[in-house]
Image (cartoon, rainbow, N blue to C red):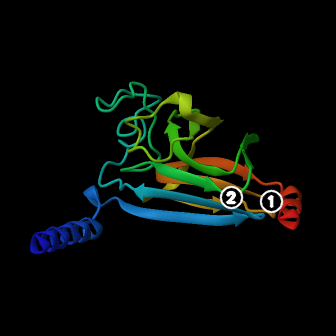
Amino acid sequence: MKQLLLLVAFFATLSTQAQLTTLPSGGNKRAIVGERVGLTDITISYSRPGVKGREGKIWGQLIPAGYTDQGFGSSKATPWRAGANENTTFECSTDIKVNGKALPAGKYGLFVAYGADESTLIFSKNSTSWGSFYYDDKEDALRITTKPVATDKSTEWLKYEFSNQTESAATVNLIWEKLDIPFTIETDVVANQLASFRR
């Protein structure tokens, strides 16, 4: 019996190691980008899809406009998961404002309902589901709108960047192919400082 248990433990260990060393499907590598804005740590974790020769076929085609039924999971009106594979997550260590609207400290699933003239960014309280197949608008913490901006240069691998940084604010840019979807983050440095002193 003892030998059988050791054998089971051995194969379970091999299985776990195999899962940890397997490359992601489709070459969509995981990435994490973060910045401290004021006294607030902002972290975005996502998978990076590539254009892979599909120039002109990403926005409005591969990434459909608005909401779509992907034919899998429980969601029949699904926004894009703002990356590849599992949920893109957005985490803030303190309360912030996104495009002027309040978002409490926490970890969120980040989704985009793409539109050429106006896109909707969705911060969902559910940050752990697989992609957007199980997206539920009842779990939305915040929705904002933003205007996508065409870029001159093509970006092969989706990326997030921080720009226009000040002591208490920054712009987050979702950049892929020839499009930039920006949104602004503002922090209350004085309130965060006072809360830190009280702690």
Q: Is residue 8 left or right of residue 170?
A: left
Q: Position of residue 72 (x, y in %)?
A: 29, 32
**Residue drawn 44% across the image and 48% down it:** 87
- Inspect the image, locate mark 1, and give the three-letter code of the amino acid beneath it: Ser
Q: Which residue is mark 1?
A: 168
Which of discs 2 and 1 lies nearer the camera? The answer is 2
Q: Position of residue 177 (x, y in %)?
A: 44, 52
**Residue drawn 45% across the image and 47% down it:** 128
Q: Going by the picture, which residue comes out furthest to the front?
A: 1
Q: Is residue 175 left or right of residue 52?
A: right
Q: Position of residue 148 (x, y in %)?
A: 58, 42
Q: Earlier in the sequence, mark 2 or mark 1?
A: 2
Q: Which residue is mark 2?
A: 93
Spatial separation of the CA atoms under disc 2 and disc 1:
14 Å
Q: Is residue 12 left or right of residue 71?
A: left
Q: Residues within 10 Å of mark 1 (few under 14, many from 20)?
A: some
Q: Residues within 10 Å of mark 2 (few under 14, many from 20)?
A: some
**Residue drawn 13% across the image and 73% down it:** 2
- Residue 132, quarter of the rendered image: top left
The quarter of the rendered structure image containing the N terminus is bottom left
- Inspect the image, locate mark 2, and give the three-letter code of the amino acid beneath it: Ser
What count of labels does the image hold? 2
Say which element carries label 2. loop
Say which element carries label 1. loop
The quarter of the rendered structure image containing the C terminus is bottom right
Above or below, 10 relative to 172: below
Q: Position of residue 190 (x, y in %)?
A: 89, 59
Q: Is residue 127 left or right of residue 71?
A: right
- Residue 171, quarter of the rendered image: bottom right
